[in-house]
Image (spheres, rainbow, N blue to C red):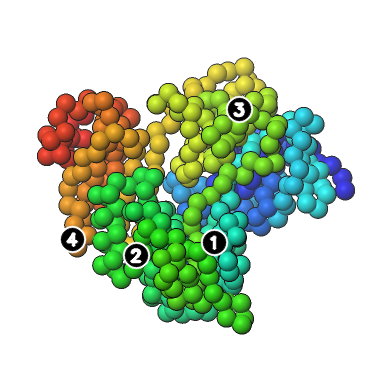
Amino acid sequence: MAEKHFKYVILGGGVAAGYAAREFAKHSLNPGELAIISKEAVAPYERPALSKAYLFPQGAARLPGFHVCVGSGGERLLPEWYLEKGIELILSTEIVKADLASKTLTSAAGATFTFDILIIATGSTVINLSDFGTPGADANNILYLREIDDADKLVAAIQAKKNGKAVIVGGGYIGLELSAVMKINNFDVTMVYPEPWCMPRLFTPDIAAFYEGYYANKGVKIDKGTLVVGFDSDTNGDVTSVKLKDGRVLDADIVIVGVGGRPLTKLFKGQVEEEKGGIKTDAFFQTSVAGVYAVGDVATFPLKLYNETRRVEHVDHARKSAEQAVKAIKASEEGKVIDEYDYLPYFYSRSFDLSWQFYGDNVGETVIFGDNDPASSKPKFGSYWIKEGKLLGAFLEGGSPEETKAIAELARLQPAVPDLEQLAKEGLSFASKI
């Protein structure tokens, strides 16, 4: 099989790959210089759609509607766009070996690709219950959600098991978003997670109490503080029930597991420096190997705002880190210098009629404000995180675009907070004073 050479190769076909391609196209790019190699069969798309509108019973999102870069208000990059720009999309191609010293990638089919500059944008893979040896975890209709193929399997299961029982394993992003969307599809939904409250990596008990109450009011049952220890299936191999550590058994037609992900760094073990579970990079996303960059979920990078290194798994960082790496590559070629990556951590989610945003760091004492009654017709509340007299993080549910912008500015500026009681009274109006 003939070897193919490219000046630039982006390995991975997710969100970061699409945003990197757009950034390359903004600079001088000759036809045939850039390739995206992806094991997925479609051009890069906005992955967050898969746990939301893709699963709606009416008006569901479908490709080409959510190809990048529509998620950030940009132009939709259809497969034809890559063709027009002279970018080669090498799809349905899994790379099984990477040799950074010889700048060579080898596919499962035995094809080889060489490069001058590599951007590692491999993202994460879901943690599978089979990895833990959970009995019965390989039954049919025990599903995961990461790629569009996974979403298609879930859509088929929703149609096959209409109005059935769904058990969602996990209380984080995927757990909350999929519990909502399964309820919208008229399923009997139970969420199961071992933590004392949902989304524990970000939510305080006060914030979590609102969402748990709101979901309960929508008819979602919540079993927290217990583990899933096994599954039963019928003679066809379809899952029928979920066994809990406390001895109870939940009936299930569909099980969706969302218990986290792992960055896909295995191909590069021993070839690049690693830190905090990811590939260590500088502020321009270059790794310890010259000409090799890592972006998105796999990158552990200097977080300038807090003077520490961090790995961030979120679509916003995937987009921005990809753009930063390409800007750095092109600047280096032109003998120029660009600013270091100065990222403000940002997370968001949408489910039912809810929409929240968080900016900054969730460390220190917390102050909650506003209407966080789950029974309110239009709840609107927030929380601030204060450490050593400075506001470091801000969360807002139900805010307007202007209010969201204001809390982002707070998290960036880190204003002094002399009085927590006064801050609680002022609430959102504190943001307008800064």
Q: Nearer the viewer, mark 2 or mark 3?
A: 2
Residue found at the far bottom of this picture:
235
Q: Position of residue 213 (x, y in %)?
A: 26, 61
Of labels 1 and 4, earlier in sequence is 1
The residue drawn where x is 39% and y is 45% is: 201
Q: Residue furthest right?
A: 1
Mark pair 1, 3: CA separation: 32 Å
- Secondary structure found at label 4: loop
**Disc 2 marks which residue?**
222
Q: Secondary structure at mark 3?
A: loop
Q: Earlier in the sequence, mark 2 or mark 1?
A: 1
Q: Relative to the observer, which residue lies in front, 48 or 206?
A: 206
Spot occupied by residue 238 in the image (x, y as percentages of width and height): 57, 77
Q: Earlier in the sequence, mark 2 or mark 3?
A: 2
Quadrant of residue 183 within the rendered picture:
bottom left
Q: Which mark is residue 286?
A: 3
Instruction: From this view, report whether residue 114 is shown above or below residue 339.
Output: below
Q: Earlier in the sequence, mark 3 or mark 4?
A: 3
Q: Secondary structure at mark 2?
A: strand
Residue with the mark numbered 4 = 376
What amino acid type should be assigned to the residue bearing mark 1?
Answer: Tyr
Callout count: 4
Residue 136 lies in what quarter of the image? bottom right
Residue 57, percent across and down? Answer: 43, 72
Q: Is residue 333 left or right of residue 427?
A: right
Residue 144 circle label? 1
